[in-house]
Image (cartoon, grey):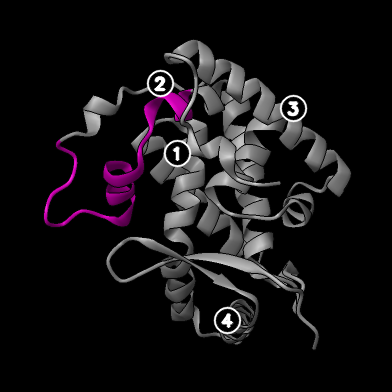
């Protein structure tokens, strides 16, 4: 069975994240497929490994849409439940991460249509972490950039989605095209326009609007 080249972001044992590329990513894709086959064969406990593998990335995605910790956690749980209930329609041989994030993006967009996100000041998270912190809390403590998150969340969904997947989840334009069911050229156009809109918003929110690493990624 042939697998596409891929890049995957995974949580490590300390709650941080690392990137996998090419051959290593292919092993993860194969591992996902083996887990899914086992789950469909009756080993429901295997789904815990899927949750462990993707929970931080899904929470990150949900948070950029909601700007709220509890809403992001609820959405993340809903996404995993929805994915579990639809495992029988997952096409074996394709990247599970792409299929999972397609569910995640659609679920988050549905949430956005029903409820307008509320911005939460970064200072609210200063004392959020304790010795028993979850990976989601560690992410908020270590990586939160309130002005960028606010600017991204304020963009129209077609632009915020591609920016979230490209910059914060490290998906390629081709992978984003598969997740959003849009032509690759359309994704590239939305990335270009979204970057321009985001740069303008960041410029108006900061002194000079420079120094944001988010906008320095090639592509």
Q: Quadrant of residue 21?
A: bottom right
Q: Nearer the viewer, residue 215 or 184?
A: 215
Alpha-carbon span between mark 4 and mark 3? 33 Å
Please provide percent x and percent y for residue 116: 52, 20
The question of residue 141 being in magenta is answered with yes
Q: Residue at x 66, y 47 (%)?
A: 218
Residue 115, placed above or below residue 183: above
Asked if the residues shown at circle 1 and circle 2 are in contact, with their CB atoms under 8 angstroms apart, the answer is no
User: What's drawn in magenta, residue-wise?
Assistant: 127-150
Residue found at the far left of this picture: 131
First in sequence, mark 1 or 2: give its number: 1
Residue 119, placed above or below residue 4: above
Q: Residues within 10 Å of mark 1 (few under 14, many from 20)?
A: many
Q: Residue at x 72, y 31 (%)?
A: 158
Q: Quadrant of residue 160?
A: top right
Indicate the secondary structure of the residue bearing disc 4: helix
First in sequence, mark 2 or 3: give its number: 2
Q: Residues within 10 Å of mark 3 (few under 14, many from 20)?
A: few
Q: Residue tagged by mark 1?
A: 63
First in sequence, mark 1 or 3: give its number: 1
Q: Nearer the viewer, residue 117 or 184?
A: 184
């Amino acid at each position: 069975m042939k697998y596409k080249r891929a890049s995957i972001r995974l949580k490590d044992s300390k709650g941080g994240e690392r990137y996998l590329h090419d051959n290593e990513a292919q092993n993860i894709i194969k591992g996902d497929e083996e887990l899914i086959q086992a789950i469909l064969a009756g080993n429901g406990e295997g789904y815990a490994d899927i949750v462990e593998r993707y929970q931080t990335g899904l929470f990150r995605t949900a948070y950029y849409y909601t700007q709220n910790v509890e809403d992001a956690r609820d959405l993340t749980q809903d996404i995993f439940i929805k994915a579990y209930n639809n495992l029988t329609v997952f096409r074996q041989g394709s990247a599970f991460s792409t299929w999972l994030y397609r569910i995640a993006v659609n679920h988050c967009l549905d949430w956005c249509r029903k409820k307008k996100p509320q911005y939460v000041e970064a200072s609210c998270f200063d004392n959020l972490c304790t010795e028993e912190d979850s990976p989601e809390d560690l992410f908020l403590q270590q990586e939160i950039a309130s002005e960028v998150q606010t600017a991204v969340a304020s963009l129209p969904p077609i632009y915020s989605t591609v920016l979230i997947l490209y910059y914060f989840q490290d998906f390629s334009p081709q992978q984003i095209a598969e997740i959003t069911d849009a032509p690759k050229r359309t994704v590239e156009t939305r990335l270009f326009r979204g970057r321009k809109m985001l740069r303008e918003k960041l410029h108006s929110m900061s002194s000079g609007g420079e120094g944001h690493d988010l906008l320095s990624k090639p592509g």
